[in-house]
Image (cartoon, grey):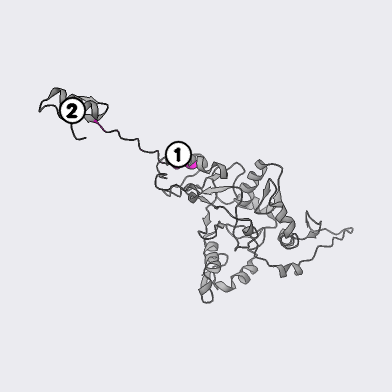
Amino acid sequence: MSLFHNAREINRVNPRKRKVQENIIVQESYSCDLCNDEYDSETDLHVHRTVKHKFAMEKMLIKDNVCKTCITKHDSYEHLVKHIKSVHLHSSEDAEYVEREIFICDICHLIYFNKQTLCVHILYCHNKERIDNTTADCPKCNRIIHVKNAWYHFQRHLIQSVGCCPICLKKCKNQRQLIHHVQNHQSFFKCNICQYDASNKKQFDSHMKSHNNVIYDRSKEDNVKCCFYPQIITRKSYFSAGLWGYRLHGLQICVLCRAICKPEAANDHISRCHAIPPAPAVKKAYICLCGENFFNNILLRHHVFKMNSDDHKACDK
C-alpha cells in the first residue's frame, strides 16, 4: 500500500534498541533486510526502506521476480504471482478473478477496495484548483472533513499504515494479521457486466462463460490494452506516493470481468473470453432467373447469351 509519508518523518522514527532482560517481555520487532535496523512496526520499517534505501530499491526493480509494489524479492515468478494475488489483491493465491470489490482511478490507475477512499483520493490529488473549499466524508468515521486536511485526519485513523485493512480501514498489527483479517470479509462475486450476484466461485465462473464472445468487438477497437488496468507504468512512478491506493505491477486486471491476467496473456484472454468472432464474408450470388447458380459473373453472362431468352437474365442479388 502506498504510504503517505514524507522524508521529514523518517527523523521521528529511530531504530529500536532491543534490551533483553530477565522477566521482561520483548515486543515483536521488524528488521530491515538491507541494514538490519529494527523497528517496532512494519509501517516504520516501510518508511525507513523507502527513504534511506531508495537507490538500493531502484536497483532491485530491474531484477527478476521482484514485487514492484512493495519491493520484495521472491524465489520464482510463480511465487511472485501468488504474493501479488494474496497480499496486494487480497484474494486467494490461485484466484482467477479479484475476489474483492475494486475501484480504479481513471486518471492515475490506483486500485482501491473502498469507494469512499477513492472519492477522497480524486478530490485530493486531481482537484487541486478547488481543494481549499472542498469537503468529503471520511470513510472511517463518516465525519465531513476538508479535503486539504485529509492527510492529517487520516493520520488519526492510521489509514496510511501497512497493516490497515483497505476494505473496512481497521488497523491490524502487521500484514500477517491483515491477511487473516481480510479473509473474514465476504468474497465478492458480482459480474461487472450485468450486475449478476453469485454465492460462490463455481457459479460465478459458470456465469462469466455465458458472456464469452458477446462483449468486446475487436473490429471497432484494436487497442486491447484499454480493457486492462493498470496500464503500462514507467519506473519514475514506482515511488510516487498516491493516496492510500495500490499500484499493481506484474499483473493486470480485466475491467470487463475482473480476471487476473499476466501481461503476455492479455490478448489471449480478450480473444478467448470477450471478442466477438468476425462475421463471415458474404459471397455475391450469380443467379439466373431460371434459378441456376454460377461461380462468377462470366459464366452467368455466357449462360444468358447462350439461352438468348427473356426467361434467362441475371438476378440482382
Position in image of residue 192 (x %, y %): 45, 50
Residue under numbered circle 2: 288
Circle 2 residues within 10 Å: few <14, some 14–19, many ≥20: some
Magenta-tinted stretch: 269-285
Q: Quadrant of residue 46?
A: bottom right
Q: Residue at position x 39%, y 42% from top?
A: 214
Residue name at image x 16 percent, y 22 percent? 306
Judge whether residue 187 can be spotted in this image. Answer: no
User: Dot 2: what SS?
Assistant: loop
Tell me if 21 is positioned left or right of 150 in this view. right
Q: Earlier in the sequence, mark 2 or mark 1?
A: 1
Question: Can residue 278 be found in the magenta stretch?
Answer: yes
Magenta-drawn stretch, dominant element (helix, strand or loop) = loop
To which residue does mark 1 refer?
209
Q: Position of residue 288 (x, y in %)?
A: 18, 28
Q: Residue at x 68, y 48 (%)?
A: 66
- The amino acid type, in three-letter code, at marker 2 is Cys
Q: Position of residue 44 (x, y in %)?
A: 73, 62
**Quadrant where the N terminus is found in the figure:** bottom right
**Extreme residue in the right direction:** 22
Q: In this rendering, is residue 12 above or below 246?
A: below
